[in-house]
Amino acid sequence: MRLEKVWLIVRCGSRAAQLQARRCAEDLRAHGIGVIVAASGLAQNPFPALLATEPAPPDLALVLGGDGTVLGAARHLAPHGVPILSFNVGGHLGFLTHERSLLRLADDGSAEPSLWQRLLADRFALERRMMLEARIERGDGVSATATVRTRAPIAAADVDADGPHGALNDFYFRPCLDEVSPTCLLELEIDGEVVDQYRGDGLIIATPTGSTGYAMAAGGPILHPGIEAIVVNPICPMSLSSRAVVVPPRSRLTVWPLGESSRRVKLWKDGAHASLLDPGDRCVVQQGPHPALLLQLEQSPSYYRTLTHKLHWAGSLTNGEASSN
């Protein structure tokens, strides 16, 4: 792997991540590798400025934080083909990150090479994770009772504000009014065919990577990230017949907010705000054109081992210990 320039992305507000980033930056520069350090968080997004001012994308993005920091990096760097190597420093669950113990910087004389030696010797695997893309189309003039829809083109002024939005985990639609009952009515169309109308707390559209996130918390299935598919999962639907479904990756999903004009819906991408939709607008979600590139350092990685560790599976219900098998 060529390592001439590295972007060191640090979880905003984490002292542990900042301290580790300082060590990494010093070590990278000692190896003659150019490095740019930037903080990332819900209120701080360094990527638009970096991509606009730097002459070229980096050879590697080294992310120190939790899953949220990785998701933010993937949304911006996947279109540029930048591989991401992440470590759980200051994060929480860490489904997408390596354990901090693998972050070995200097050569301490042991048989194990340092992190930089491993990267330069191509001792890693590269995972391609499917992403989603969403575009919002405004103002069809659709009423709550309309049965025939006239589909207007997207206005030029709306292109930047309304997409494309990328997501590695999921898009979800939630009511945006706090002063009324937190429910909404969403119609789902798949490949031109109306499939269901969901009345409830919202709707999740997730990748296999995102199936262990909000979708799992809402009762959806867990998909292996090696599968390319899309999970459609209602959030607390007011109907026993509204169930999670898994559809092919090439599907075109269109979500229409229905109801009164005051029933606006908020679109979220990987837990970050994306846009607002009014009844009459629509959001089209499809597989993204670029996968996220995640570096894997473990010699024998196991997705099932990650699940059992993170979700505390295969343990005793009484003492929290694993079985003897």
Image: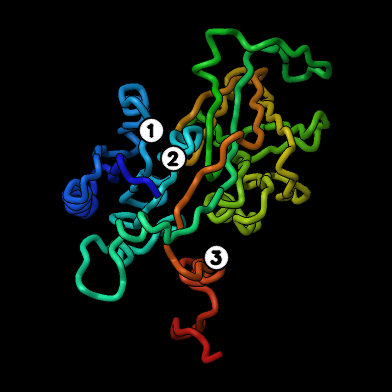
Which of the two labelled residues, at mark 3 and mark 2, occupies the earlier sequence position?
A: 2
Q: Where residue 57 is drawn, which disc sits there? A: 1
> Disc 3 designates what residue?
303
Residue lying at 56% horizontally and 51% vertically, measured from the top left? 209
Q: Amino acid at mark 3?
A: Tyr
**Residue 297 placement, left or right of 176:** left
Q: Are marks 1 and 2 in contact (CB under 8 Å)?
A: yes
Circle 3 — which element?
A: helix
The answer to whether residue 152 is above or below residue 291 is above
The answer to whether residue 243 is above or below residue 98 is above
Circle 1 — which element?
A: loop
Circle 2 — which element?
A: loop
Q: Quadrant of residue 182?
A: top right
* Residue 248 picture location, percent across and down: 75, 45
Residue found farthest to the bottom: 324
Foreground of the two, 46 or 210: 46
| Disc 1 packing (10 Å; few <14; some 14–19; many ≥20) | some
Foreground of the two, 225 or 185: 225
Q: Where residue 20 is drawn, which disc sits there? A: none
Residue lying at 37% horizontally and 44% vertically, measured from the top left? 60
Foreground of the two, 248 or 54: 54
Q: Amino acid at mark 1?
A: Pro
Q: Where residue 82 is drawn, which disc sits there? A: 2
Quarter in which the C terminus is drawn: bottom right
